[in-house]
């Protein structure tokens, strides 16, 4: 029987084999009921009174007056109800849900039979390459020339890169999903380069191999997009530095734990990029932001829940200054979530980098869009205390993940750009190039430059590890310098 892997958790785990257990797992994972059988007896047990049961579930209550059993199941983004003979089979509901969330749940590769002691290692490798976990495991299953075969000094007590890589990810990257995702992406890039050049496994790479990889990262490459047009792909300086740092961290960990007898990556990363070298350059001008605000305000009375959701996403990124991933809800932490105090003030709580929680006071301008979206979902306008629900739902259920959130904001930029193509082509081009992170830059600039908020306060709101990163936003504004120059030299 085909097994499904849940890539919505770190590391990915296998969905339970039996239908009932899988549906129970999906109910917890997606944050909504998936399949439930109801009888009148169970209704009496679940609700304080029949009156409250009728108010909460009127369709179900009326069905149970005429039938001994009824079923609730999730389909096409909402909960449906029918008497048991008209409802789909539990296995069909499970199959539709798993296939409907294809970005999260994926079939385990054919021919991959995992023993219990190998399952966890396979799950860690699935983070690196979720589509080809078995072939990746085969490629890593060897030990290279530098593997330490002496058990008395090899503290990892493994002899192949599959196990050694899994231990590295678990030990060094598992504390934060952001870190784990970044490490996985850079390891995937390194492994892809090795396989393209018929090198490997990782423990077999020499110093010369890693220097060639460093050169590869700094060299622009030609690519052809889906329209058949050529474009130049270049890895940015910060991305190059991170990719080399991850490689160096891997080999240093292997050397320190005795898995390797030598460290070919020693000194590969010379020095560290100073934080004060950070200078954000990707900003949307105020006019472009106002155009986006005006375009979103046209959807105040929209009957379409998708547009109400998009409007809520926009104001949370626009006025919350959060990172893209910080709006993707996680059931383990119940973050992000909004809390409303006794004075009606809203605060957004998120899980930042390094799993550091952060509280962000929200301006009143976000209340109406978020309340309208919640009402359309059948929720109270203001979040209740101790609410455990995704802040932004997927239309098929569960939570909207990073890719979906990115697409929603990009759709706004693209739509507004289309309205400006004739009147202001430069502004339209800028909007087409923009990403959600540009809204975070705009939020930071508004704090540091426009309103001169004290740097420690701005640092806390933005979740920066160093105040120097926050201070870098002041370097991007020449207004004060221009004023000093004009007052000094203009007569």
Image: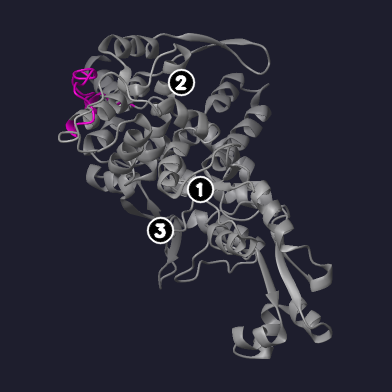
Q: Which residue is mark 1?
A: 8
Closer to us: 460 or 406: 406
**Most common SS among magenta residues:** loop
Q: Quadrant of the C terminus?
A: top left
Q: Is residue 347 visible?
A: yes
Q: Which residue is mark 3?
A: 333
Does label 3 or label 1 sit earlier along the sequence? Answer: 1
Find residue 372 and report its image quarter.
Answer: bottom right
Closer to us: 437 or 57: 57
Which percent across, then down, holds residue 471? Answer: 25, 34
Residue located 74% across and 72% down the image: 71
Which percent across, then down, holds residue 223? Answer: 56, 12
The stretch of residues the image draws in magenta is: 256-279
| Residue 59, numbered label | none
Find residue 429 and report its image quarter.
Answer: top right
Closer to us: 450 or 435: 435
Q: Is residue 299 visible?
A: no
Distance from Cα at disc 3 to Cα at disc 1: 14 Å
For label 3, count other residues whose C-alpha is less than 10 Å away and answer few (under 14), some (14-19) or many (20+). Answer: few
Residue 225 in magenta stretch:
no
For label 1, count other residues whose C-alpha is less than 10 Å away and answer few (under 14), some (14-19) or many (20+). Answer: some
Which percent across, then down, holds residue 8? Answer: 51, 48
Residue located 25% across and 41% down the image: 465
Q: Secondary structure at mark 2?
A: helix
Q: Which residue is mark 2?
A: 192
Q: Is residue 116 left or right of residue 175?
A: right
């Amino acid at each position: 029987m085909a097994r499904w892997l849940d890539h919505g958790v770190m590391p990915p785990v296998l969905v339970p084999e039996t239908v009932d257990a899988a549906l129970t797992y999906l109910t917890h994972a997606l944050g909504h009921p998936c399949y439930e059988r109801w009888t009148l007896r169970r209704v009496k047990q679940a609700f304080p009174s029949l009156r409250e049961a009728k108010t909460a579930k009127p369709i179900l209550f009326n069905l149970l007056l005429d039938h001994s059993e009824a079923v609730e199941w999730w389909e096409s983004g909402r909960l449906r109800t029918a008497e048991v003979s008209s409802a789909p089979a539990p296995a069909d509901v499970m199959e539709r849900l798993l296939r409907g969330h294809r970005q999260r749940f994926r079939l385990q590769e054919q021919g991959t039979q995992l023993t219990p002691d190998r399952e966890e290692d396979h799950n860690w490798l699935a983070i690196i390459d979720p589509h080809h976990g078995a072939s990746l495991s085969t490629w890593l299953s060897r030990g290279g020339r530098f593997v330490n075969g002496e058990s008395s000094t090899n503290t990892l007590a493994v002899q192949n890169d599959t196990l050694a890589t899994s231990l590295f990810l678990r030990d060094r990257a598992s504390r934060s999903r952001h870190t784990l995702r970044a490490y996985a992406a850079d390891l995937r890039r390194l492994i892809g380069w090795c396989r393209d050049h018929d090198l490997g496994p990782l423990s077999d790479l020499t110093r010369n191999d890693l220097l060639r990889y460093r050169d590869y990262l700094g060299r622009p490459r030609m690519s052809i997009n889906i329209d058949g047009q050529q474009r130049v792909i270049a890895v940015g300086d910060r991305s190059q530095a991170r990719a080399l740092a991850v490689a160096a961290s891997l080999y240093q960990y292997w050397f320190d734990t005795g898995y390797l007898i030598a460290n070919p990556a020693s000194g590969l990363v010379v020095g560290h990029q100073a934080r004060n070298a950070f200078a954000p350059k990707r900003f949307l001008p105020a006019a472009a932001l106002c155009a986006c605000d005006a375009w979103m305000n046209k959807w105040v009375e929209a009957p379409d829940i998708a547009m109400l959701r998009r409007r809520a996403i926009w104001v949370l990124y626009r006025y919350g200054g959060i990172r893209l991933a910080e709006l993707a809800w996680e059931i383990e932490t119940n973050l992000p979530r909004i809390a409303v105090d006794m004075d009606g003030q809203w605060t957004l709580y998120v899980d930042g980098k390094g799993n550091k929680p952060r509280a962000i006071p929200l301006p009143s301008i976000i209340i109406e869009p978020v309340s309208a979206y919640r009402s359309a979902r059948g929720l109270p306008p203001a979040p209740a205390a101790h609410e455990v629900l995704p802040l932004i739902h997927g239309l098929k259920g569960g939570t909207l993940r990073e890719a979906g959130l990115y697409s929603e904001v990009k759709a706004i930029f693209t739509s507004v750009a289309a309205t400006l193509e004739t009147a202001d082509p430069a502004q339209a081009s800028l909007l087409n190039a923009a990403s959600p992170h540009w809204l975070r830059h705009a939020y930071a600039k508004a704090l540091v430059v426009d309103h001169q908020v004290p740097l420690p306060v701005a640092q806390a709101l933005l979740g920066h590890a160093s105040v120097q990163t926050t201070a870098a936003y002041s370097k991007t504004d020449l207004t004060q310098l221009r004023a000093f120059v004009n007052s000094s030299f203009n007569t």
